[in-house]
Image: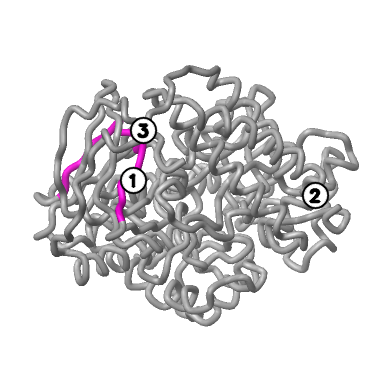
Amino acid sequence: MNYAISRDTKITKTYEYDVVIVGAGLAGLYAALNVDERLSCLILAKENMDCSSSWLAQGGIAAAINHDDTPQLHLEDTVVAGAGENNMEAVSILVNEGPSDIETLVKLNVPFDVDEYGEFHFTREGGHNMRRVVHAGGDATGRETIRALAYVVAGRENISFSGHTCLFDIIADGNGVEGVVVRLFDSEFHYIKTNNVVIATGGIGQLYKSSTNPIVATGDGIAASIRAGASVSNIEFIQFHPTGLWDSASNGSEFLISEAVRGEGGLLVNTEGERFMVGVHELAELAPRDIVARGIVRELGKSGESFAYIDITSKPEEFLKKRFPTIYNECLSYGINIAHDKIPVSPIQHYLMGGIETDLNGCTKIYGLFACGEAANTGVHGANRLASNSMLECLVFGRRAAQYINKYHSGPISHDDFNIEDLPPRPRGKLDYKQLRKQIQELMSQHCFVIRNKAGLQTALEQISKIYSKLESIYDDSTEYVETLNIATVAKTIVEAALKRPESIGSHYMENKGK
């Protein structure tokens, strides 16, 4: 299947831009700000700028800018967390170029938290051996960064923005990208001609029953890239954050208890009040995320409970209110005062380490198609992302993709004109998308979670493949259809990749030696 659209799709308007960026999180906005102002640039968002994983990011941005830190030390921590599966050249670029991008954010008025001397306030998170994470608004780094960048974007005459716009397909021919087809909230389909498409659509959280990702994270950019013929890699490496706020009335998009809480002294304890990460890893609660997530899952298996606890009650209430205002107030809404009460937590889907395969400039195998941020596999994260490297990756590789476009892709390219009539027809139909989505989420949460095994993955693949075939056999011009198709496409790809890697490494942990 090459397209989600069909010959029956009614395209009502056609536009033309030099660059189209799909996604309005940190990677998309920062890429847009680095596009040459002589080039017309359009940013597409499925909702608004306040509906992205970047907006929800709490912890901060890791960069070696503290006086006793170095890029080499940052590189070493990144590679240890990534179980050595990292692309070393990409990691070197990340840690060496990242500090200058932090300087750029300061110039763009991102309000980073500072100490009494006006210097960055650094914190430490899991897997880091140094205090190198800068943050804004206490635990609202993503929100404050997006707000600042969105303000600058709004002032750029060459940048346009289209919200409530869902990507259906990337159109490409033998010469590369020639455009995208999108559906607007009012059901109109538009064709946007461009030689440069940057996929910055974020993660795949809605493949699972519970995720820290927003509800729009249905893998749209990854699935559309797969349909267009791009390669994906390391897509089986999915990070499950150890400490999602446990809620008995889960709605699928859950609140994250930032790693920074453990970085400031929070302890993981079971329902008996006993620490259980001591002796599991030398960093105990601050071990890499995959190790802590497995530690909690095993502890819950022993106790039969649904959650463990983070205990940060050793800290004064005023400190917690100032350092973690978002977490403090969110927990309070659940009747939990984190200064006096332990916080119930359990592992939750959080981040995709792999994705659309790119080179060091965000280029994919399709000429004119780029990817950056969580949707891309630049190779920096390896098998397990180091805490707070995600926002840094958005900055470094979003900028590099834009700079590459400025240098090499600013001129026109000859294409065959896209004609919707050339597409094969598919019978119109309508399925119970809510139910199909729920089935995939159940299968992924049961068989492709923190701990996996071969038999479970095979069961998941068999069932998801059947759902995918049903969806592929029909055409429906609704957003619900394409989202469900995208979820099925990416889930199938993930499970297939997991089955091809029988050994345990990083976030991909196979029990019983793959049996």
Q: Earlier in the sequence, mark 2 or mark 1?
A: 1
> Measuring 83% from the left and 34% from the top, which residue is drawn there?
305
Q: Nearer the viewer, residue 342 or 35?
A: 35
Relative height, residue 233 to residue 10 (above, below): below
> Measuring 40% from the left and 26% from the top, which residue is drawn there?
479
Is disc 2 in contact with disc 1, using a CB cutoff of under 8 Å? Answer: no
**Is 435 displayed left or right of 107 in the figure?**
right
Question: Callout 1 environment at 10 Å: few (<14), some (14 to 19), or many (20+)?
Answer: many
Percent x, y for residue 1?
A: 47, 40
> Measuring 36% from the left and 36% from the top, which residue is drawn there?
168
Give the spatial CA distance, label 2 vs label 1.
34 Å
Percent x, y for residue 504?
A: 76, 61
**Is 270 displayed left or right of 211 in the figure?**
right
Q: Amino acid at mark 1?
A: Ile
Q: Amino acid at mark 2?
A: Lys
| Disc assigned to residue 332 | none
Give the spatial CA distance, label 3 vs label 2.
35 Å
Residue behind mark 2: 454
Residue behind mark 1: 170
Question: Callout 3 environment at 10 Å: few (<14), some (14 to 19), or many (20+)?
Answer: many
Q: Nearer the viewer, mark 1 or mark 3?
A: 3
Which element type, helix, strand or loop, lies under badge 1? Answer: strand
Is disc 3 in contact with disc 2, using a CB cutoff of under 8 Å? Answer: no
Q: Amino acid at mark 3?
A: Ile
Q: Nearer the viewer, residue 345 or 330?
A: 345
Does the stretch in magenta take in 499? Answer: no
Which segment is the magenta one? 159-173
**Is 214 displayed left or right of 46 in the figure?**
right
Does the stretch in magenta take in 169? Answer: yes
Q: Quadrant of residue 24?
A: top left
Q: Nearer the viewer, mark 3 or mark 2?
A: 3
Question: Callout 2 environment at 10 Å: few (<14), some (14 to 19), or many (20+)?
Answer: many
